Image (spheres, rainbow, N blue to C red):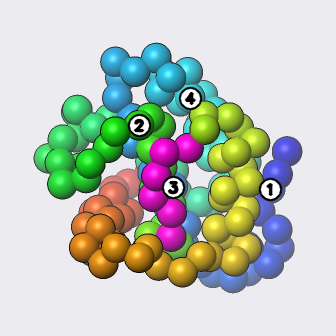
Amino acid sequence: MPELTDTQRQAGSVTLVVCLCAQWCGVCRDYRETFTQAAARFAPTQFIWVDIEDEADIVDSLDINDFPTLLVAVNYQPVFYGPLTPRPETLDRLLRSCMDRPPPALHDAALQDTLHALVKQLAARKP
């Protein structure tokens, strides 16, 4: 099972992983356990599950068409946003990649701003 490396722990970076799903979606319901297990493996990374219908007010400006859709932010900057194959190894690989060497900011400036605002709002929640 992957764990955070010493470098990742000492880097002092804050990583937030948000899964945008819907309760009515069977794939999402099945994926929730994978997401919860990843949260344990990648502690102290903050993992947040957002039901897009229950919390439509905060995700309404996003065009979410596929589930699960993941948002990963490093130091409050969105570095990944999009659908993800709902497999544990895919999630682990993505997270390790984002933590080891965060990719550049997203190319769409408007989307970047929207996601940045969402990240700040979600990061303020108590885990």
Rendered location of residue 34, percent (x, y): 64, 33
- Distance from disc 4 to disc 1, alpha carbons, whole Å, reads 20 Å
Disc on res. 17: 3
Q: Are marks 2 and 1 in contact (CB under 8 Å)?
A: no
Q: Secondary structure at mark 1?
A: loop
Q: Is 28 inside the magenta-drawn segment?
A: no
Residue 36 lies left or right of residue 68; in this view the side is right
**Mark closer to the chain start, 2 or 1:** 1
Q: Are marks 4 and 1 in contact (CB under 8 Å)?
A: no
Rendered location of residue 3, percent (x, y): 80, 56
**Quarter in which the N terminus is drawn:** top right
Q: Is 82 inside the magenta-drawn segment?
A: yes
**Mark closer to the chain start, 4 or 2:** 4
Rendered location of residue 53, percent (x, y): 23, 32
Q: Choose top left, top right, bottom left or bottom right for residue 117.
A: bottom left
Which label lies toward us, 4 or 2? 2
Residue at x 71%, y 38% (from the top left corner) = 88
Which three-letter amino acid code belongs to the residue tagged 4? Tyr
Q: Does residue 18 lie above or below 105 as drawn?
A: above
- Distance from disc 2 to disc 1, alpha carbons, whole Å, reads 28 Å
Q: Return the residue found at the far left.
A: 57
Residue topped by disc 4: 31
Residue topped by disc 2: 66
Tell me where the magenta segment starts and ends, as one range: 79-84
- Distance from disc 4 to disc 2, alpha carbons, whole Å, reads 13 Å
- Distance from disc 4 to disc 3, alpha carbons, whole Å, reads 14 Å
Which three-letter amino acid code belongs to the residue tagged 3? Val
Disc on res. 3: 1
**Mark closer to the chain start, 4 or 3:** 3
